[in-house]
Amino acid sequence: MKKIKVIGGGLAGPEAALQAAAAGCEVHLYEMRPIRSTEAHQTSDFAELVCSNSLKSESENSAPWLLKQEMRRANSFLLADADATAVPAGHALAVDRELFSARVAARIAAEPRITVHREEVTTLDENDPDTITILASGPLTSPALAAELQRLTGSDHLAFYDSISPIVDATTIDRDKVYFAARWDKGTADYINCPFTKEEYDTFLDALTTAEAVPPKSWEQIPTVSTEPGAPYMTASSSCVGGTTTEPSTTPEKLQYFEGCLPIEETARRGRDTLRFGPMKPAGLTDPKTGRWPYACVQLRQENLRADSYNLVGFQNHLKFGEQARVLRLIPGLEHATFLRYGQIHRNTYIHAPSLLTETLQLKAHPSIMIAGQLSGVEGYTESIASGLLAGRYAAALAHGTQPTPAPRLTANGSLTHYITHTEIKKFTPANITFDLLPPLEEDLRKKIRDKKERHKIQCDRALEAWNAWLHD
Ligand SMILES: Cc1cc2nc3c(=O)[nH]c(=O)nc-3n(C[C@H](O)[C@H](O)[C@H](O)COP(=O)(O)OP(=O)(O)OC[C@H]3O[C@@H](n4cnc5c(N)ncnc54)[C@H](O)[C@@H]3O)c2cc1C
């Protein structure tokens, strides 16, 4: 039987290791902390939650609940530890992070089939006939390993940067001030447009360019991919998915950004009209009230199928959250807006899964190497554990000499994997589990059942039935 090498002792790695060991495999789990840490981890613990302590909603028939229910039915070890260390958090599953990590560590220590190696892995052997490798080194994969992954996947297939635009609650947009329109009337009028007069634009620009930015931290800078083990993180001069780097920044923080996801305040500093000819371009957006194009315009794009939230197109930024609230409320129509998410820019290493991964999380070109966790293109703690669960089970099947069967499309796990491996979105970005990823109900059912909650219940029932059948196959 082949042995299994798991790289990464975060969330996906330990779950994968425990699943494979439970299926009778010999597992070697590699974690580089404490020899080398990442920009966000604080400890050398397994399963460290780097930011919040929430594994999201437990509300029955919500998408995060469905994902967790499937994981529980598949005996997810980390989810059992999360349940055992839960703290009161309303409808969410939140954990005591130290107890959670301690339980995971105890499980690993008690599993004789797992050998732990505290070292940084810097090479991947795609031709080793005796080993299945699960790469679960996360969004902050060390530069040497990222370089190795780049060698295997091609340089265009590894993104290093995540930029997030703010999202606004649709019900808080002042509909009297905005209008729906498609630029040059091409396509359907799906965008909400917020029109500016010259005075409004000047006020907004002054506020934007003088707003306080998040202080720089080394982990927010982009790493130069160095093949030197132990090499420090550095600001990049290389290119990657998302564009080419800018000239040295003019921001006070002296950070360098990729052109493809330049913060809006950085663009604004390049000249008073730069935004009017860039992300706030009004051309082709005739305001029905005036019959003319406004002086400048912010476009809001529907965020989900429910149309209950919209993102501000091109408004990724690096400002403090309080400053974002103040400045973004100067946009006509958003004076009383509630922001569901603020803009952010942070490092996030992930592969272009749609072109590289199979539905069983194997590299198409090197099937003995599997990718799990955030690196595979899923987003979030629970999603990362879920993908570790699948990778561990698939790897165990491969180690035993059988071809694994992918999780069914009808399930939350299957839909998440289907999204990362099949999406045709041009700029692939990692995804949380949502109902948008699950197959919709048939049209006649959709017409018959108007209530969203009822529809979701049917989707959940179907998913759990398909998941049970797959588990017992
Ligand atoms: C700053 C930040 C904040 C986040 N906050 C949240 C949040 O609040 N909620 C949420 O749901 N998601 C959050 N995420 C997203 C994501 O859910 C987490 O990053 C999650 O930990 C991903 O799980 P993972 O197992 O893929 O990676 P990780 O948990 O990061 O585990 C990867 C492990 O691999 C190790 N490693 C890296 N390189 C090597 C190497 N060469 N050799 C050996 N070991 C190596 C690392 O030390 C790490 O322990 C955040 C991400 C970041 C970057």
Image (cartoon, rainbow, N blue to C red):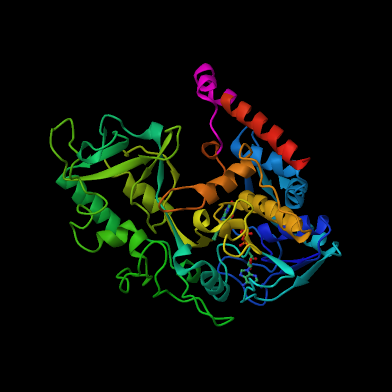
Can you tell which quarter of the image residue 143 is in? bottom right
Q: Residue at x 69, y 64 (%)?
A: 9
Residue 427: x percent and y percent? 41, 53
Magenta range is 438-454
- Does residue 458 appear left or right of residue 222 in this picture? right
Nearer-the-camera pick, 348 or 437: 437
Q: How many marks?
A: 0
Residue 446 in the magenta stretch? The answer is yes
Q: Quadrant of ligand 1?
A: bottom right
**175 up-or-down from 96: above or below:** above
Q: Quick check: can you spot residue 210?
A: no
Residue 76: x percent and y percent? 75, 49
- Does residue 12 appear left or right of residue 322 in this picture? right
Residue 108: x percent and y percent? 80, 62
Q: Quick check: can you spot residue 274?
A: yes
Image quadrant holding the C terminus, namely top right
Residue 20: x percent and y percent? 77, 58
**10 up-or-down from 420: above or below:** below
Residue 445 in the magenta stretch? The answer is yes
Can you tell which quarter of the image residue 30 is in? bottom right
Nearer-the-camera pick, 2 or 35: 2
Can you tell which quarter of the image residue 168 is in? top left
